[in-house]
Image (cartoon, rainbow, N blue to C red):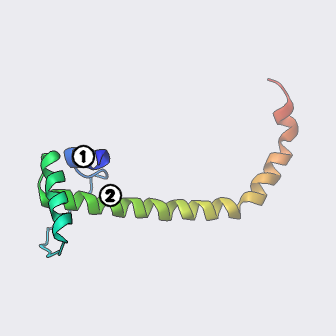
């Protein structure tokens, strides 16, 4: 909730240029809509901004997870090279400066 509040106050984390807006119709269970409206009021925002910020945060998080997964694959692919380099410089690492 705190991250969402910061996002609402500061605008988009990534400061992207937004394309023209389009209207969408989204169905919510009544209880969820009430909770969203309460959160928007608590954050001194409106329902639309709350939903936009929440969706953006979700998508940014998904993108970060995909990036981290690609990094993990790259690190694993280069593990042997990294280990060999570390072994080559092991003697130098033991020397004091």
Q: Quadrant of residue 19?
A: bottom left
**Number of residues whose C-alpha sits closer than 10 Å to that of mark 1, classed few (under 14), some (14–19) or many (20 or more):** some
Residue 40 higher or lower than 23, as above or below = above
Residue in the picture at 73% in, 58% down: 79
Residue in the picture at 27% in, 57% down: 16
Whether residue 61 appears in this view of the structure is yes
Whether residue 17 appears in this view of the structure is no
- Image coords of residue 71 (percent x, y): 58, 60
Q: Quadrant of the C terminus?
A: top right
Residue position marked by numbered label 1 in the rendering: 5
Q: Which mark is residue 57?
A: 2
Residue in the picture at 18% in, 59% down: 36
Seen as rendered, the residue at the extreme top is: 97
Task: Describe residue 77's horizontal placement relative to residue 38 as left or right.
Answer: right
Task: Describe residue 68's horizontal placement relative to residue 88 as left or right.
Answer: left
- Image coords of residue 28 (percent x, y): 19, 71
**Number of residues whose C-alpha sits closer than 10 Å to that of mark 2, classed few (under 14), some (14–19) or many (20 or more):** some
Q: Quadrant of residue 56?
A: bottom left
Task: Describe residue 75's horizontal placement relative to residue 83 as left or right.
Answer: left
Q: Quadrant of residue 96?
A: top right
Instruction: Say what secondary structure mark 1 lies in.
Output: helix
Seen as rendered, the residue at the extreme front is: 31
Q: Which mark is residue 79?
A: none
């Amino acid at each position: 909730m705190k991250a969402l509040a910061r996002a609402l106050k500061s605008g988009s984390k990534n400061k992207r240029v937004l394309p023209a807006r389009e209207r969408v119709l989204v169905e919510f269970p009544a209880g969820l809509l009430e909770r969203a409206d309460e959160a928007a009021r608590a954050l001194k925002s409106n329902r639309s901004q709350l939903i936009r910020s929440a969706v953006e945060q979700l998508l940014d998080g998904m993108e970060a997870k995909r990036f981290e997964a690609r990094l993990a694959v790259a690190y694993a692919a280069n593990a042997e090279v990294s280990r060999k380099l570390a072994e080559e410089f092991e003697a130098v690492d033991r020397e004091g400066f």
